[in-house]
Amino acid sequence: MRQNKKSSFEPTTIMLAASSKCPAECKYCFAPAGMEDMSLDILERAVTFIKTLLGDQKRFRINFHGGEPMMAGIGWYRKALPLLRAAFGARVRLCIQSNLWLLNQEWLNLFNEYGVGISTSLDGPESICDGQRGAGYFANTMRGIALIRANGQDVPVIATIGKSAANAKDCREIYDFFNSRRLHFAVHGAIPSISRGVTEETLPPGGMLVVLKSMAEEYFRDTRAISINMIDTMIRALYYQRPSLCSFSNCLGSFLAVSADGKLYPCQRFCGVSPYAIGDLAENPDQANIIHSGGYKLLADTRQEIALSCLESGCKHFPYCNGGCCYAAIAARAHKTVLHGRDPFCAAYRGFFDALEVRLTAEMQDSMIGAGAAMPLLSITQGARYMPRAHP
Ligand code: SF4
Ligand code: SF4
Ligand code: SF4
């Protein structure tokens, strides 16, 4: 069984870590610290590199990431956005993942002028959010969300659930918060960082199943108002037997992160973790250099080990789970939060896939006999539902 020795590197999502700085102090943060903001020289090198790598036809996405990417300053974006549009035109979809603390109408006008989609991070109601992310986070981010909505735009949210909120009561409150405000959200568990280790908010492996089941219980009462990205993705993955979120796909080769100092990584989560660097713009790498880099080989080998471990465990969900997130697995190995070496939320994903499968099968049987019962899971598999951006 060979899973991941990809012979081509053609990312469809490129993350530009414009700044590693951030005014917030979330307890589970693992952004690299102490790096200068991305210079325009590095951005220009990145543009040249992407052009050579992807040619002049492929459509792809650039996601400004951090730290907090707006910390690079509006002047940087006034130069960067026209540069990127001139180089790639409409075939690049521009997005920014920001906590919105710096957002004002001037920023918003600039993002609108260049078609930049905005998504944010918020962990639910103020007491829960600020308990994990520090005092003032909720108010600052909600102000940004209100501004975007006042301009008639939608803003998808990523909610990260840490140890303190991984209980049925808090999960219900988090769901009610997003549902009552009609905010679509993606749910992630707080994982340890490879470089910073376990934090007080790292979600214990079993906590993720509590989170998924508690949220789903509320969500399945009415799936029309909002969507929960992780749950929708898992239902679709089961139904179509293929993954659609990076955490459940073989991500190697599909993502590229450019850190503020011009080093290249397989995903923004790895920025600053030097064994996983796959190149450096200063050395004008090409596709072959990337594939033969130490970081790429290391990750391919790790992916392979994870895949073998999944298959040896007899897991039937591998075709659409793919071993989960390889960063999470590597961080969990480094800090020994699980012993099996797979994604620390493996047992939670497996248990939740099992539960969804039972329910989806029952709904499919009901639909065949025209039982007329509510079918929340089947409705999620059908038609275009709102999908927040996949990457944290
Ligand atoms: S907003 Fe993001 S980058 Fe900033 S401290 Fe929180 S997790 Fe880290
Ligand atoms: S978040 Fe995890 S699964 Fe997604 S691209 Fe990064 S390493 Fe891969
Ligand atoms: S549920 Fe666990 S064992 Fe199954 S594919 Fe996912 S990570 Fe592997």
Image: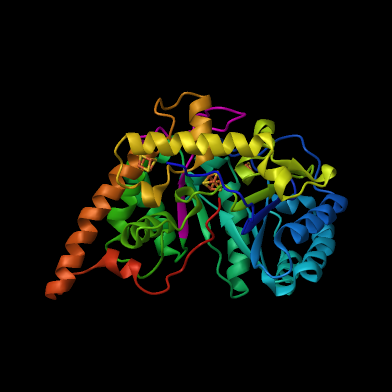
Q: Position of residue 317 (x, y in %)?
A: 33, 47
Residue drawn where x is 48% and y is 48% of the image:
247
Residue drawn where x is 51% and y is 40% of the image:
326
Residue 385 lies, with reference to residue 145, above or below; the image says below
Is residue 7 located in the magenta-colored stretch of the structure?
Answer: no
Residue 29 lies, with reference to residue 254, above or below; the image says above
Judging depth in this view, the residue of 284 and 103 nearest the camera is: 284
Q: How many marks?
A: 0
Q: Quadrant of residue 80?
A: bottom right
Judging depth in this view, the residue of 341 and 43 nearest the camera is: 341
Judging depth in this view, the residue of 82 and 213 nearest the camera is: 82
Is residue 186 located in the magenta-colored stretch of the structure?
Answer: yes
Q: Assign the N terminus to one quadrant of the image.
A: top left
Q: Position of residue 100 (x, y in %)?
A: 65, 56
Residue drawn where x is 28% and y is 63% of the image:
377
> In the image, which residues are magenta?
185-207
Would residue 374 be found to the left or right of residue 36 on screen?
Answer: left
Would residue 14 be found to the left or right of residue 381 on screen?
Answer: right
Q: Is residue 67 visible?
A: no
